[in-house]
Image (cartoon, helix red, strand yellow):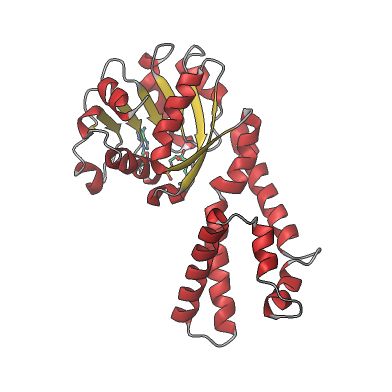
């Protein structure tokens, strides 16, 4: 479904906080007319009110897509509003972490096409990555429609089964926070070596952003890029000897961190 088709049938957005706003901004920039969007949110932001979309207004009878972007703990109160669209032609897309497809099927009906998605916050600058998986009732067309919509805020990848969602949450869903922490700690480490705080932070931010951009666009793998800048017995190697330590280096640390996030995602899914 392209933006024109979505515009014709209408799109309902349930919950317009950080993630909902980032997506809505992407759609409006991508040409979706504000008049074809209905937002349900108890406290619409100033930005939202300035977009010209319908806010907490009477909803269309059969929207093409309903996108669910409320917090998982609000799902119980928020979802029943959408029940009348269940078991019909409306495609439901949820970006809520930890809420399973089965939970949506219970409330909305198992005949509803449902796509569960896990985006991440770089969506706010159009550089997110979203993993998607459909329920048995979601067709290829439904998945293509979901992908088309989510591409407004970055890349989209498809999963083979819903069980992969917990590990995706541990890598890309929660991952931006790991990188923010890398920036913080790189800057503090620079300060410890005598740099002024502001300069250290500027160096850290630009280094992470620049290396990320290079890793994404270069033909070489990240491992090769690392090898390319590591001369034997040079400065980089001195640091990498610390970071690549088998016992307490990056590999062991990130493995534990991602495992902890994945485990927590499974726990949240169990409620
Ligand atoms: N942020 C991320 O990095 C990220 C990544 C992946 C997935 N997600 C998922 O995206 C979803 C939204 O996260 P977020 O960070 O955007 O949270 P958020 O900023 O708190 O946004 C949720 C919005 O829903 C509104 N809301 C609450 N109850 C509602 C109801 N009954 N009906 C309609 N709207 C209601 C909230 O209003 P009030 O603020 O007034 O309560 C808020 O504006 C979550 O399920 C989360 O798991 C987020």
Q: Residue at x 31, y 43 (%)?
A: 25
* Among the 4 quarters of the image, the one containing residue 35: top left
Residue 210's place in the image compared with 121, above or below, is below
Query: Is residue 81 at all visible to an observer of this figure?
Result: no
The image position of residue 161, as x and y in percent, is 64, 28
Residue 107's place in the image compared with 182, above or below, is above
- In the rendered view, does 28 fall on the left or right side of 230? left
Tell which of 140 and 72 is nearer to you: 140
Q: Dividing the image into 4 quarters, which one contains the C terminus?
A: top right
From this viewpoint, which residue is outermost toward the bottom? 194
Query: Is residue 217 at all visible to an observer of this figure?
Result: yes
From this viewpoint, which residue is outermost toward the right? 246
The image position of residue 137, as x and y in percent, is 52, 15
Q: Dividing the image into 4 quarters, which one contains the N terminus?
A: top left
Residue 256's place in the image compared with 39, above or below, is below
Tell which of 220 and 128 is nearer to you: 220
Residue 74's place in the image compared with 6, above or below, is below
Tell which of 76 and 9 is nearer to you: 9
The image position of residue 252, as x and y in percent, is 75, 58
**Dividing the image into four equal quarters, which quarter contains ligand 1?**
top left
How many dots with numbers? 0
């Amino acid at each position: 479904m392209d933006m024109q088709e979505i515009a014709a049938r209408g799109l309902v957005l349930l919950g317009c906080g950080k993630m909902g706003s980032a997506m809505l901004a992407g759609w409006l920039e991508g040409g979706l007319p504000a008049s074809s969007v209905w937002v349900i949110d108890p406290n619409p932001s100033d930005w939202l009110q300035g977009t010209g979309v319908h806010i907490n207004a009477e909803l269309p009878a059969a929207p093409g897509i309903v996108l669910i972007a409320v917090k998982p703990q609000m799902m119980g109160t928020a979802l029943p509003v959408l029940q009348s669209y269940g078991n019909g032609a409306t495609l439901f897309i949820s970006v809520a972490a930890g809420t399973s497809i089965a939970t949506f099927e219970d409330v909305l009906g198992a005949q509803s096409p449902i796509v569960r998605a896990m985006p991440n916050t770089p969506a706010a600058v159009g550089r997110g990555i979203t993993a998607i998986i459909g329920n048995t009732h979601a067709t290829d067309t439904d998945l293509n429609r979901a992908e088309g919509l989510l591409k407004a805020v970055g890349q989209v990848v498809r999963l083979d089964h819903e069980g992969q969602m917990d590990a995706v949450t541990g890598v890309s869903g929660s991952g931006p926070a790991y990188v923010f922490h890398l920036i913080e700690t790189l800057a503090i480490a620079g300060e410890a070596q005598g740099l002024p705080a502001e300069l250290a932070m500027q160096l850290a931010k630009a280094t992470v952003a620049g290396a990320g951009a290079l890793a994404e666009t270069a033909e070489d793998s990240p491992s090769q890029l690392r090898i390319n800048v590591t001369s034997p017995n040079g400065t980089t190697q001195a640091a990498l000897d610390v970071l690549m330590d088998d016992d307490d280096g990056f590999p062991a640390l990130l493995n534990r961190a991602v495992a902890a996030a994945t485990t927590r995602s499974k726990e949240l899914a169990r409620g």
